Image: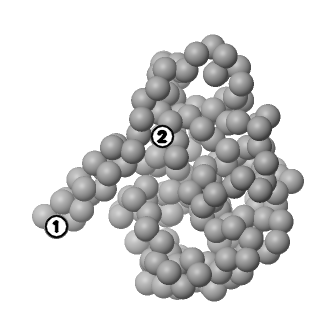
């Protein structure tokens, strides 16, 4: 029963942060759209949804913790992917008893579903200090997906931009604004 209440609270928190906007054709042209083919970013981005990425205005200096970025992931294969920025250069990242800590402070992550952290190998992991010129990224669905725990940090040169909106294929102009 307690798990159900936690789940409902989490889903309500995530839903309340999702602002639906109508994208104009100019908005759609100003962003590159990429289809997310897997569940690695659920519950934030569902499999098959499109993210609209600001590739023209991207500046590495503007990256913030919590941004969802599109980048070229070199391992295990060269592919385009999206993940959430968890830590910036100079920060220390680690997991203790499945909880994420950045600079020795427990991270507040309302976008991570509680059922998506207990089956992962990150019960105890790290600490790792993020190198200059890169960011540490994780999947919102922690149980699956290759992220910085396995592949290391993402270098700035591999980042295409920050995802600003997410939409379904059936309603590409009715988008949710991403944080």
Secondary structure of residue under mark 2 = loop
- Quarter holding residue 9: bottom left
Task: Tell me which residue sits at (79%, 75%) in the image.
Answer: 131
The answer to whether residue 65 is left or right of residue 133 is left
Q: Residues within 10 Å of mark 2 (few under 14, many from 20)?
A: some
In this view, which residue lies farthest toward the left?
A: 1
- Quadrant housing the N terminus: bottom left
Residue 92 badge: none
Structural distance between the alpha carbons of marks 2 and 1: 25 Å
Residue 5, relative to residue 159: is it above or below? below
Nearer to me, 21 or 98: 21
The answer to whether residue 90 is left or right of residue 11 is right
Task: Tell me which residue sits at (56%, 44%) in the image.
Answer: 38
Residue 46 badge: 2
Location of residue 108 in the rendering, given as x and y in whole percent from the top left corner: 43, 68
Task: Tell me which residue sits at (82%, 71%) in the image.
Answer: 132
Name the residue carrying label 1. 2
Q: Residues within 10 Å of mark 1 (few under 14, many from 20)?
A: few
Residue 9, relative to residue 124: is it above or below? above
């Amino acid at each position: 029963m307690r798990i159900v209440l936690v789940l409902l609270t989490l889903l309500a928190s995530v839903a309340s942060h999702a602002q639906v906007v109508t994208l104009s054709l100019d908005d759609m042209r100003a962003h590159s759209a990429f289809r997310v083919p897997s569940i690695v970013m659920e519950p934030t981005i569902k499999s098959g949804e499109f993210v609209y990425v600001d590739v023209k205005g991207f500046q590495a200096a503007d990256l913030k913790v919590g941004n969802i970025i599109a980048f070229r992931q070199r391992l295990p294969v060269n592919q385009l992917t999206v993940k959430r920025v968890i830590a910036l250069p100079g920060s220390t990242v680690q997991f203790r008893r499945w909880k994420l800590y950045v600079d020795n402070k427990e991270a507040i992550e309302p976008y991570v579903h509680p059922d998506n952290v207990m089956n992962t190998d990150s019960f105890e992991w790290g600490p790792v200090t993020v190198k200059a010129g890169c960011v540490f990224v994780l999947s919102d669905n922690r149980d699956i997906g290759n992220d910085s725990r396995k592949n290391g940090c993402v270098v700035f040169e591999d980042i295409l931009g920050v995802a600003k909106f997410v939409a379904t294929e059936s309603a590409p102009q009715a988008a949710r604004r991403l944080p």
